[in-house]
């Protein structure tokens, strides 16, 4: 399961998405996430599916690698589907046993919410798959630079986010090593009830926290020894500059949002109970 967590990891490839300006990918991801919640029909899901399929194809990130990142949220996905399926009581009753009822509205809500959650994870993961932490830092800092006029520490916030994303795969790898070391020493991490499994995680969490604090201290000392004092007066080795393909990407994203809003809202396609 630890190896299946791909969030925050960069997948190197030579694709048009990798070459886009990080600001374009940040804005496009934000608009894409909004677009998932502005329609209530089958036609909207068809458009999103086609759009997401084209973007995944252009990214040149293997679909198996992308889908592997869905495994850690499987429990959350199932819980979300069950809550919507059994707690939504609108429409005609499709199935009933005692107090358990599945209604037309509950089934529709469960299917829609499950698809939205999957598409949300895939779409947001593509940004980190195609953007290095340094590019992401520069993009966030450049995008929110106007906020510096009201004394918002944009550079520091961007740096914190980039460090957090970079630490995710490092800590996951460290967790995997600690788990293997504890299993080699005879620790039982699988058997027992929920409380016993939680207790068995203590020998893993304690060294993990110690390792995380040690890494954070080493990073802080390294940054201080190199004269890092925030973003004031700093220059970029590769300054961000929009190119023609970035403007085309903005236009395509704007066209997609308009289409998903107009068709998804005003020209719904309904199939069966959906």
Image: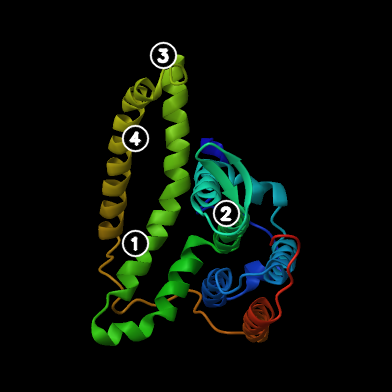
- Upstream in sequence: badge 3 or badge 2: 2
* Foreground disc of the pair 3, 2: 2
Front-lying residue, 205 or 22: 205
- Upstream in sequence: badge 1 or badge 2: 2
Query: In the rendered image, which residue does mark 4 sit on?
Result: 208
Q: Secondary structure at mark 1?
A: helix
Query: In the rendered image, which residue does mark 1 sit on?
Result: 160
Q: Secondary structure at mark 2?
A: helix
Question: Where, by quadrant of the figure, is residue 127 drawn?
Answer: bottom right
- Upstream in sequence: badge 3 or badge 4: 3
- Upstream in sequence: badge 3 or badge 1: 1
Q: Secondary structure at mark 4?
A: helix
Query: In the rendered image, which residue does mark 3 sit on?
Result: 185
- Upstream in sequence: badge 4 or badge 1: 1
- Upstream in sequence: badge 4 or badge 2: 2
Q: Secondary structure at mark 3?
A: loop
Q: Position of residue 152 (x, y in %)?
A: 27, 78
Tell me what residue is drawn at x 32 percent, y 51 percent.
219
Tell me what residue is drawn at x 42 percent, y 17 percent.
192
Tell me what residue is drawn at x 63 percent, y 56 percent.
12
Tell me what residue is drawn at x 44 percent, y 44 percent.
170
In this picture, is 117 found above or below 234?
above
Front-lying residue, 155 or 90: 90
How many numbered tags mark residues here? 4
Visible in this render: residue 104? yes
Q: Position of residue 77 (x, y in %)?
A: 54, 47
Using residue 163 as the reference point, say whether residue 266 is left or right of it. right
Q: Position of residue 54 (x, y in %)?
A: 74, 67
Quarter of the picture containing the N terminus is: top right
Visible in this render: residue 5? no
Query: In the rendered image, which residue does mark 2 sit on?
Result: 106
């Amino acid at each position: 399961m630890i190896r299946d967590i791909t969030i925050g990891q960069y997948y190197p490839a030579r694709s048009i998405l990798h070459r886009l300006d990080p600001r374009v990918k940040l804005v496009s991801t934000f608009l894409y996430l909004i677009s998932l919640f502005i329609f209530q029909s089958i036609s909207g899901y068809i458009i999103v599916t086609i759009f997401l399929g084209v973007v995944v194809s252009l990214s040149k990130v293997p679909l198996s690698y992308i889908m592997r990142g869905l495994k850690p949220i499987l429990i959350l996905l199932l819980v979300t589907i069950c809550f919507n399926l059994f707690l939504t009581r609108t429409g005609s009753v499709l199935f009933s046993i005692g107090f358990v009822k599945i209604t037309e509205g509950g089934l529709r809500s469960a299917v829609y919410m499950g698809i939205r959650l999957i598409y949300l994870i895939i779409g947001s993961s593509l940004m980190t798959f195609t953007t290095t932490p340094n590019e992401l830092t520069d993009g966030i800092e450049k995008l929110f630079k106007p906020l510096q006029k009201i004394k918002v520490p944009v550079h520091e916030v961007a740096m914190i986010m980039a460090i957090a994303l970079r630490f995710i795969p490092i800590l996951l790898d460290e967790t995997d090593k600690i788990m293997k070391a504890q299993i080699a020493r005879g620790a039982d991490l699988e058997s027992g009830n929920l409380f016993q499994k939680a207790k068995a995680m203590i020998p893993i969490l304690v060294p993990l926290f110690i390792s995380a604090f040690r890494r954070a201290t080493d990073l802080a000392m390294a940054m201080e020894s190199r004269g890092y004092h925030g973003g004031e007066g700093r220059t970029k080795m590769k300054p961000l500059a929009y190119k023609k393909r970035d403007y085309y990407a903005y236009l395509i994203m704007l066209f997609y949002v308009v289409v998903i809003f107009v068709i998804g809202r005003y020209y719904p396609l309904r199939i069966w109970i959906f």
